[in-house]
Amino acid sequence: MRGQLMRLFTETQHREILGETSCNVTAADIYNLLMGDMPCSVTRQNVKYWRKIFGGAKTNMAKADRALKEDRKFIPPTPLQGDTKFDPMHMYESILVIPDQHAPYQHKDAVAFLAEVARSFTPDLIVNLGDELDYHAMSFHDSDPNLDSAGVELEKGKAWLAKLAELFPTQLVCDSNHGSMHYRKAKAHGLPVQLLRTYREIIFPEGGGDGWTWAESWTVQTPAGPVMFKHQASGTILVDAAHNRCNLMVGHNHGNFSVEYSSSPAALLPSSLHPSSRNPRPA
């Protein structure tokens, strides 16, 4: 389609318009004026591409296509690094998993319970399955007007997470649908990620949280084989476990607790649903 749109204009017209202004937006307006009432339009991205073709002494679409492909760099998602000192090859014997907290709507005894679990089992790794904050007032769904505003809710949630950080200063945290609410809201309203603060900057605005590291998922070596921790499965849990060829533990599914197995002649792959550690919201 880009070729058909481009060929609505002669090479001479392209060179005249592109030579008239260096602003792609202004050039796009000139193109659209020439097109009149045609049911299509020229964008600044079209103009940027056409400059690669008609901007030099020679017209060369193949060269422009190669340059366009070279500009498309794949940037893989990377963890928001902290001083977690997590070793993906280390064999972890005891792992404490913290399911969805949804602060400030966490269970009132959550910190005390986690402290007792840690005292009893002395874990050598802490994994947080995400939804550390609830962001109820910012939800894409209807919110309860009787609950706190977004700002008050955030401050209360941060106060509770400060207690969790004091108890567990080092955590692997899974990216999650509630935890990433400000990123999702920004995307929905066209705000670039460069304008946003990171998870750590939001939760620990005065500093701290250096031992918390966020990533989409974490794969940990255990005596029972590798275990992947993530907030939410991609599709069904068993299919996700089979796809990654490892045990899988997820949160997100509130009120559910189960262990499921998928087997083949080559492997036995369990997956686990972890319950939420929040209180039900007030009705």
Image (cartoon, helix red, strand yellow):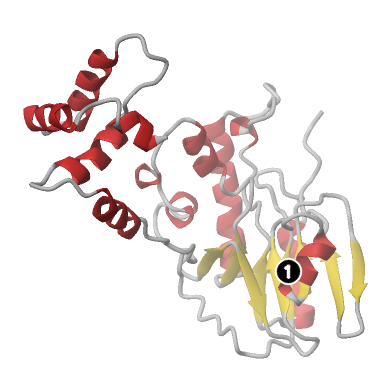
Q: Residue 94, image x and y in percent?
A: 74, 83
**Quarter assignment of residue 148:** top right
- Quadrant hosting residue 119: bottom right
Q: Which residue is mark 1?
A: 97
Give the x, y percent position of residue 58: 12, 48
Give how far across and how far down residue 187 sits, in percent. 48, 38
Q: What residue appears at the point 51 percent right and 33 percent down from the top-left corner?
A: 188
Which quadrant of the view contains residue 264? bottom right
Residue 197 can be seen in this image: yes
For residue 186, above or below residue 144:
below
Identify the amino acid type marked 1.
Answer: Val
Note whether 192 is above or below 242 in the view shown.
Answer: above
Q: Is residue 116 above or below residue 225?
A: above
Number of labels in the image equals 1
Relative to 130, 29 lies left or right:
left
Q: Position of residue 55 (x, y in %)?
A: 13, 42
On screen, residue 35 versus residue 165, left or right, reads left
